[in-house]
């Protein structure tokens, strides 16, 4: 080996001698086979798929909880569940779907796709990427351990005090939620930082900020928002834990605390979170819908601006969850106005999609089916949100099934429909094989019909006054038939999702081979093989437009060179570029596979478990373990250029 | 209620037309549920301007969904065939020509105008209902408990003050102030046909007001999740003409009937029930459960969960945990004879 170079101009190469260099790059980038490689890998593609599989598993768990509840609610005065069981189920259903499914699934797609979209070889901080995955997984297991001892959280996903106080809820139920939430917050925050650095500094040369793929705009926006908003909720849960175990009085009114403080801290995170878990999904639609419509996205700049604007306004609407708490009319008026006007940027995206379909020539693929269905449910979820934004109307609608309908149109409609469309679009890239289109379309119809039959009637149940979070209702309230219809719809929806699951299982083995670019799409991920090699790109591509693979056919000069660029094969390397113009800036040395992320997340799991058990000596031991592992992780390494001098 | 919808509509013909359109659409879907829905609020007797705002935004919402769905379907099907496919390749790209950004701006302006309009309408309605139309003469203090409602009428002097539970009587046609407190966790006060929700939050007092235009019984319900029996935390608001309300109020001011003083049933009650329940005029002074001084004047028991009839009352006393699992009223292991006696005693509390 030669002396490490701190200052060199990288070679430019094209695809000649490809096989030699690809063999060399493969030996540098590929994880070792066997258990070590499986546990230690930092490859964003492996981790992205793990995120997706794990998030879908949580979707399955939350879905089973929902179906059990729908059996209980199918008829009045049903006794399938006790009130305590029902309360644990609806709480876990909400927590699972909102925290352990909605964002992680989008993170999965982003972890897999962002480096490919941007034209680099991995996420900026690959070991951190592995760490955030393990933390996500272990925090979820931690949360679900509560079921094993029959003490799952039971105060609703927004966990209002004093219901969640030690006096009202003395068991470990709430502590599981508090610890798991803070634990997961670590993953989300660090994941956000990783995306910010990757998207701002790891773009291919020439991919100036105005050529950023629209999907990266979504991920970048919500990553900043995660970093800014999660401290509020982590703090809230930490204070609650202090109240519960150390006799502090942050939320206890009897001793000068303030129950509304909880609501402010919670929604200060909670409402931005709603946008955090939908904006990347919307931006996946903006990314893939134009491919289905055979033309570039209409009004790219407006859509990018709208994404950012929605997120900014999203920080100014949290009070609309608290319209009924007796706040001054002036505050209500302000937050009501913002809650209504936040529909404007969403409308921009909607019009851009419609215009893209209108002026394009839609290709009736399963992806397009899901996206067309998505637009319909997007609008329904949007207008019901607009209705609840108006204070006097919200005073009637809030805490009824109308709001239940609204949140499901937003979370399933805006998130799951987009995710399913994206799955059919990008599965060929991830697996190298196409999903079965026929099964896909059958799945779509089950999902679309089941979803609307299940959730549309809930608007009406809500207008007829059914409060949310009731474990049963009596026959004389006029809600029986609608609830039965909703229950049937929920099962039809579940069948639709199982068909897609079956499709994945089947197609990953026997599906039609995809080739590099089965949809004839326009962005960099389609310029490499399916699935991509461990190093993503043989050479770092150079980009000169938003649609590098379509340039010649759009009548633009063909200036992007996906197949010619910096070779960067003197070790595990990728290119860092400048923030706005993406001018080549630094050669980045990328770390090898490492067990440190796994070990550190295990040590963190031990930390939270010992906090739960109040086992203070063990807590001390976990802290020491965390320090040691962090030191080992950060110890300067020669092959990362962190120590001067020659490598042996 | 659904059957009364004709009478409650707004005044202008155009609004009326839109409302009818919405109703038809809703009814189409809700046909099975039409029978009777006591917590329905679209056809309530509360402040009219809220109902018209609700109908307004509902109508706009439905129109938006229909228009966008129409545009989408047209874009997918009609437009698809009109674009000439210049080559035999179906997947040939459509060029950027005809980039319809101007249409997006037009749509943006239109939706901004509508949204600003609704914002102004919201502000006007909010200003209207923030305070009652006249100073309320009656003030009622409602305290939320897990899982029932304590209702206290505060008079000018203590002799005019009394407490009851789960039933709020108000005079028709005048605003009534409601002061809301909570004894344990957060609850929310909601009488759909009369007013929107206001939370009952420990450590603070929230105030709202209700006004019933018509005499009648209106159902209310706790709408903030408050634990095991959140589902069974209802109440009733009974609006009656002024004289009838006054008669009721005077009746409630009396101490308990003396018909059964010294009866076996009263002895059992004092042993088993008095720790938690008050019967004014007797030694029973418990504050944990509802005041039972005039239990027989109330229409329901267990926070609007069961009708107040002999059979239900016996069943409730014998095993409250069967009706409301988790309820704070324990199973008393009361034998058949004692049960009959205590029920007989309760039946004299009119």
Image (cartoon, coloured by chain):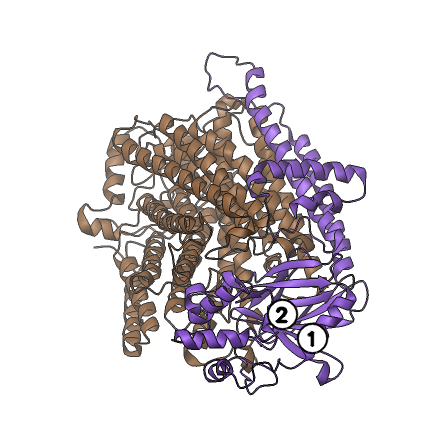
Q: Residue at x 72, y 52 (%)?
A: B50
Residue B298 can be seen, yes or no: yes
Name the residue carrying label 1.
B251
**Chain at tag 2:** B
Q: Nearer the viewer, residue A344 or A620?
A: A344
Q: Nearer the viewer, residue B168 or A260?
A: B168
Identify the mark nearer the N-term, 2 or 1: 1
Task: Indicate whether B109 appears above or below B173.
Answer: above
Name the residue carrying label 2.
B297
Residue B49, given in percent of the width and then of the height, sits at 76, 52
Task: Indicate whether A285 appears above or below B121.
Answer: above
Q: How many marks?
A: 2
Q: Secondary structure at mark 1?
A: helix
Residue B8, given in percent of the width and then of the height, sits at 74, 47
Q: Is residue A20 left or right of residue B332?
A: left
How packed mark 1 is, by other alpha carbons closer than 10 Å (few <14, some 14-19, many 20 or more), is some
Residue A640 lies in quadrant: bottom left
How packed mark 2 is, by other alpha carbons closer than 10 Å (few <14, some 14-19, many 20 or more), is some
Q: Residue at x 58, y 38 (%)?
A: B31
Residue A218 can be seen, yes or no: no
**Chain at tag 1:** B
Q: Secondary structure at mark 2?
A: helix
Residue B57, given in percent of the width and then of the height, sits at 68, 45
Q: Nearer the viewer, residue B261 or A4?
A: B261
Q: Are marks 2 and 1 in contact (CB under 8 Å)?
A: yes
Query: Distance from label 2 to label 1 (Cα)?
Result: 9 Å
Q: Which chain is purple?
A: B
Q: Which chain is brown?
A: A
Q: Do tags 2 and 1 sit on the same chain?
A: yes
Residue A418, given in percent of the width and then of the height, sits at 47, 39
Residue A534 lies in quadrant: top left
Residue at the extreme left of the image, as rendered: A34
């Amino acid at each position: 080996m030669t002396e490490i170079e701190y200052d060199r101009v990288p070679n430019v190469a094209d695809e000649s001698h490809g096989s030699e260099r690809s063999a060399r790059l493969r030996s540098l980038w590929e994880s070792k086979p066997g258990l070590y490689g499986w546990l230690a890998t930092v490859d964003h593609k492996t981790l992205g798929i793990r995120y997706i599989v794990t998030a879908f598993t949580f979707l399955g768990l939350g879905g089973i909880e929902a179906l059990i509840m729908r059996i209980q609610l199918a008829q009045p005065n049903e006794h399938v569940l006790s009130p305590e069981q029902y309360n644990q189920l609806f709480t876990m259903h909400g927590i699972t779907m909102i925290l352990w499914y909605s964002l992680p699934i989008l993170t999965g797609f982003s972890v897999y796709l962002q480096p490919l979209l941007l034209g680099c070889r991995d996420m900026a901080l690959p070991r951190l990427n592995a760490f955030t995955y393990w933390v996500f997984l272990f925090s979820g297991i931690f949360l679900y351990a509560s079921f094993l001892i029959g003490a799952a959280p039971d105060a609703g996903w927004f966990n209002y005090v004093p219901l969640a106080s030690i006096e009202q809820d003395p068991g470990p139920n709430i502590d599981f939620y508090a610890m798991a939430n803070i634990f997961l917050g670590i993953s989300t925050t660090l994941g956000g930082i990783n995306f910010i650095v990757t998207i701002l500094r790891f773009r291919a040369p020439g991919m100036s900020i105005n050529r950023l793929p629209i999907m990266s705009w979504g991920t970048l926006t919500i990553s900043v928002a995660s970093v800014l908003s999660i401290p509020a909720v982590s703090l809230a849960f930490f204070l609650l834990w202090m109240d519960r175990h150390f006799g502090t009085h942050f939320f206890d009114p009897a001793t000068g605390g303030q129950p509304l403080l909880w609501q402010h801290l919670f929604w200060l995170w909670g409402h931005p979170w709603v946008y955090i878990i939908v904006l990347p999904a919307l931006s996946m639609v903006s990314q893939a819908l134009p491919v289905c419509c055979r033309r570039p996205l209409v009004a790219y700049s407006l859509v990018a601006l709208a994404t950012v604007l929605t997120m900014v306004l999203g920080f100014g609407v949290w009070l609309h969850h608290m319209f009924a708490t007796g706040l001054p009319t002036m505050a209500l008026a302000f937050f009501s106005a913002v809650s209504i006007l936040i529909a404007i940027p969403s409308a921009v995206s909607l019009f851009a999609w419609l215009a893209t379909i209108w002026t394009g020539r839609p290709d009736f693929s399963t992806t397009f089916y899901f996206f067309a269905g998505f637009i319909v449910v997007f609008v329904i979820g949007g207008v019901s949100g607009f209705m609840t934004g108006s204070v006097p109307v919200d005073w009637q609608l809030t805490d009824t099934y109308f709001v239940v309908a609204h949140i499901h149109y937003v979370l399933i409609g805006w998130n799951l429909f987009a995710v399913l469309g994206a799955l059919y679009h990008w599965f060929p890239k991830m697996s190298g094989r196409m999903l079965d289109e026929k099964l896909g379309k059958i799945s779509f119809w089950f999902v679309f019909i089941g979803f609307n039959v299940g959730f549309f009637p809930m608007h009406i149940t809500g207008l007829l006054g059914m409060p949310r979070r009731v474990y049963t209702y009596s026959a004389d309230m006029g809600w029986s038939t609608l609830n039965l219809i909703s229950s049937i719809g929920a099962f039809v929806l579940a069948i639709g999702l199982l068909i897609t699951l079956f499709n994945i299982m089947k197609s990953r083995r026997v599906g039609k081979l995809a080739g590099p670019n089965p949809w004839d799409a326009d962005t960099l991920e389609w310029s490499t093989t399916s699935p991509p090699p461990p190093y993503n790109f043989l050479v770092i591509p150079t980009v000169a437009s938003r649609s590098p693979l379509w340039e010649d056919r759009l009548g633009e000069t063909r200036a992007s060179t996906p197949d010619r660029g910096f070779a960067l094969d003197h070790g595990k390397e990728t290119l860092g570029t400048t923030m706005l113009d993406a001018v080549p800036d630094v050669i980045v040395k990328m770390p090898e596979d490492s067990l440190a992320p796994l070990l550190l997340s295990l040590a963190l799991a031990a930390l939270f478990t010992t906090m739960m058990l109040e086992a203070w000596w063990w807590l001390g031991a976990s802290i020491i373990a965390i320090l040691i592992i962090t030191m080992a992780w950060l110890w300067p390494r020669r092959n990362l250029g962190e120590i001067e001098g020659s490598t042996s | 209620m659904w059957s009364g919808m004709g009478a409650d509509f707004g005044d202008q013909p155009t609004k009326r037309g839109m409302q009818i359109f919405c109703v038809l659409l809703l009814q189409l879907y809700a046909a099975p549920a039409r029978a009777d829905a006591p917590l329905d609020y679209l056809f309530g007797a509360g402040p009219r301007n809220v109902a018209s705002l609700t109908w307004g935004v509902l109508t706009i919402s439905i129109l938006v969904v229909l228009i966008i769905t129409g545009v989408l379907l047209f874009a997918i099907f009609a437009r698809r065939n009109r674009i000439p496919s210049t080559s035999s390749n179906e997947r040939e790209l459509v060029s950027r020509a005809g980039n319809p950004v101007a249409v997006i701006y037009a749509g943006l302006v239109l939706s901004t105008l509508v949204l600003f309009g609704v914002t102004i309408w919201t502000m006007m309605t909010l200003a209207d209902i923030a305070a009652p139309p006249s100073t309320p003469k009656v003030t009622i203090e409602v305290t939320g408990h897990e899982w029932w409602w304590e209702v206290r009428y505060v008079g000018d002097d203590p002799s005019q003050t009394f407490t009851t539970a789960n039933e709020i009587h108000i005079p028709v046609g005048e605003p009534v102030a409601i002061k809301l407190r909570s004894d344990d966790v957060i609850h929310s006060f909601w009488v759909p046909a009369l007013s929107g929700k206001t939370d009952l939050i420990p450590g603070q007092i929230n105030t709202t007001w209700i006004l019933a235009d018509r005499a009648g019984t209106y159902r209310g319900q706790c709408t903030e999740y408050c634990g095991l029996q959140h589902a069974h935390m209802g109440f009733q608001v009974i609006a009656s003409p002024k004289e009838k309300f006054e008669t009721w109020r005077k009746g409630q001011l009396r101490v308990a009937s003396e018909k059964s003083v010294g009866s076996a049933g009263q002895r059992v009650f004092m042993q088993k029930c008095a720790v938690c329940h008050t019967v004014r005029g007797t030694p029973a002074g418990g504050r944990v459960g509802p005041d039972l001084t005039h239990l027989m004047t109330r229409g329901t028991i267990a926070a609007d969960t069961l009708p107040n009839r002999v059979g239900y009352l016996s069943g409730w006393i014998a095993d409250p945990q069967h009706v409301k699992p988790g309820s704070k009223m324990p199973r008393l292991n009361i034998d058949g004879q004692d049960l009959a006696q205590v029920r007989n005693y309760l039946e004299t509390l009119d």
